Amino acid sequence: MSDILFPPLQAHWPLPTENAFPIAYRGGVAISREQFRADLLQARQALFALQQPAIALFEPDAYVFVVWLLAAWSLHMKVVLPGEDLASTRDFLGLPWVGKGSGVFARSDWNVAVNNPVHVFDHAAPGLAMFTSGSSGEPSLIEKTLTQLRNEVEAQEQAFRDRLPAGVRFIRSVPHHHMFGLPFSVLWPLTFGHVFVAEKLVYPEDFSRLPAADYVLISAPTFLKHLAASKENFAASQKVKLAFSISAGSPLPADIQRVCEDFLHAPFYDSYGSTETGAVAYRQGEDAAWILFPGVRVSVDAETSRLRIHSPFLAPEMRETGFLSGDLARMEAASFKLMGRADRMVKIGEKRLSLTRVEDALKTLPEVERGAVILLSGKSGAHSRRDVLGAVVILSPAGVAQKETLGKARFDRYLRRSLVGALDPLALPRRWRYVSAMPGNAMGKTTRRDLERLFAPQLPEAVCQMQEESDTECRARLQLYLAPEIIWFEGHFPHLPVLPGVVQVDWAAHFGQLHFGFTAPAGNVTGLKFQQLLRPGDAPCLELRFDKTRQTLEFSYHLKGTPCSKGVLHLRADQSA
Amino acid sequence: MFELIQEVKAFIIETLDLEDVTPADIDDDAPLFGEGLGLDSIDALELGVGLQKRYGFKLAAEAEETRQIFASVRALAEYIAAHRARS
């Protein structure tokens, strides 16, 4: 099927075709095709000396990565992409570790003779293997033949050919070692004579500082969110010409897409796919229908309502049946609509994480009897905090004792640290609640809502706007946001939720301690005055002044210039408490 | 430097919304990422963006330098002291 749609590229694929452009850029400096050939030969020598059928490749520089990748493929070695440099991954793979941090493969060591020709690639062999978080929660290793990868980049070129100026540079804000970044930001430009940029964009400013040229931006919503927020930085210095952007990982919100398109004058596409299937479809914005990549067909499985994908990028053994994804879907006109995940996978910063896997990891700790893990969305507040995982834990007797000794904050971190190495850093729970029994309804079923309630915030979101200190006093001004979920609004009062006065005093003490570092406990309060109610959704300003000689903390809350409350906290003289 | 270290700790706690963590819980010299506070790549981005808003300077894209700046609270405070935009 694939060979009819995609007549094979030259037999020497994935070696790049010759043209007048450099192969890549690093730090704005061109890397020539001659340099690439020389580096490739050296890498081949180093890998040949290993005499191994497979390697693990972990290398953050996309150019060096490609050199190693093609060198390995030319020697018919399988390349496993760990995606993360964890001790547990190294142990699990047990393969020679190539790339950054491997030591053995420093360039000065590349001087071993190797005689077989460089251009013999086995396109039918599974040259690549990478991890995916399977729906069961266990990451599984899946393999890709070179043909699958070639078919995918050909479909990408076919879909976007008309939008690619000569010599266009592919720049990315996503890693190049997974199934979105690798084909889109590296193999595609390499195959079709476009140019790729070796380093990854980290901050939005990295993008505005690129040398003047045409670019394709391979990105993800987290980065684009920050890019949209920093658009002011671009107006003056608009030398970067964007052909288009493709984002993946999670849906690109329409407002971010529109802001980006508006100030960068280029379409921002969203792409849908998975490690198993490669790219499936793309669309220009959340509201647009998905457009299938050339050669891809989809249907909805009658029994499970999950999306089934047929494509020439699938593994040969899946070509007949297609791939049944974990996404619920509905067919709409000639396209499809995604209806959410069928299993317990969540995403943080475009990374797919299995809640089941985190819970399993928790259970292995001696301090933990059992844990339930949920995604706490950061979107409810005004500042759109990041998403984090929250763990509700029933402790073992050993855990209860340990928590007594350490106190909650230290015990939280102790548990977190115990999971380092076993889980991706993003999968480590950030918020912890300890319970003697799981909350639940009369049927004994714990719902997501039950768990979420345990994480209702006790403090407002705060951004410090000013902080100064003299010999006699410290001052600070904080912009607060009172999310409606804040626990103190609950039941106070049922029909007219307001922020209790005692909480306002408590918060003043909290932020005073945080910013001025005094350790004495708050004693009595004088001059209390409540002038205006604070309601859910309000964004009051908190002014703090700490008098060093008197050891008093003056506080006042304001709402758009109107005073709401004020008072003076007197620190207790004896600090032994 | 003491006040600035305190300020940086408050900045980290507020920017990252670290629950139940007080400045006293953060060791001046412990690494922010990996073993120490256990921050991750999203935190690095949030801190980078937050630093620009609060102190008016941009972090270099160079990963090695960023790693040094975020090596510890003290390293970050020293960097801020040297680079903050004076008004």
Image: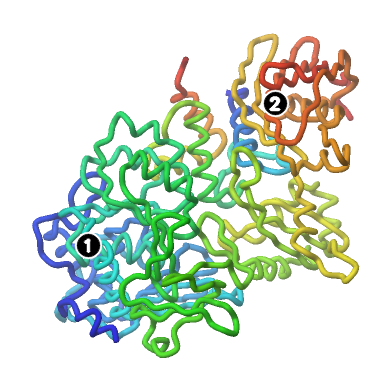
Query: Which of the chains bears the disc numbered 1?
Result: A
- Image point 10% across, 61% down: which residue? A19
**Observer-nearest residue: A348 or A498?**
A498
Per the image, label 2 sits on a secondary structure element best described as loop
Could you give the CA–CA distance between mark 2 and mark 1, rounded to whole angstroms? 52 Å
Per the image, label 1 sits on a secondary structure element best described as helix
Using the rendered image of the protein, determine whether residue A115 is visible from the camera's viewpoint: no
Vertical side of B33 occupied by A549: above or below: above
Q: Quadrant of residue A556?
A: top right
In this rendering, would A506 be left or right of A6?
A: right
- Disc 1 designates what residue? A161
Residue A451 locus on image (x, y percent)? 77, 58
Using the rendered image of the protein, determine whether residue A551 is visible from the camera's viewpoint: yes
Residue A535 locus on image (x, y percent)? 77, 32
**Observer-nearest residue: A269 or A39?**
A269
| Mark closest to the chain's N terminus, 2 or 1 | 1
- Disc 2 designates what residue? A540
- Name which residue type carries label 1: Arg
Q: Quadrant of residue A247?
A: bottom left
- Image point 18% across, 70% down: which residue? A15
- Image point 59% across, 31% down: which residue? B8
**Observer-nearest residue: A383 or A5?**
A5
In this rendering, would A189 be left or right of A485?
A: left
Residue A134 locus on image (x, y percent)? 55, 75
Sort mark 2 into few (<14), some (14-19) or many (20+) by Cα contacts within 10 Å: many
Residue A141 locus on image (x, y percent)? 47, 77
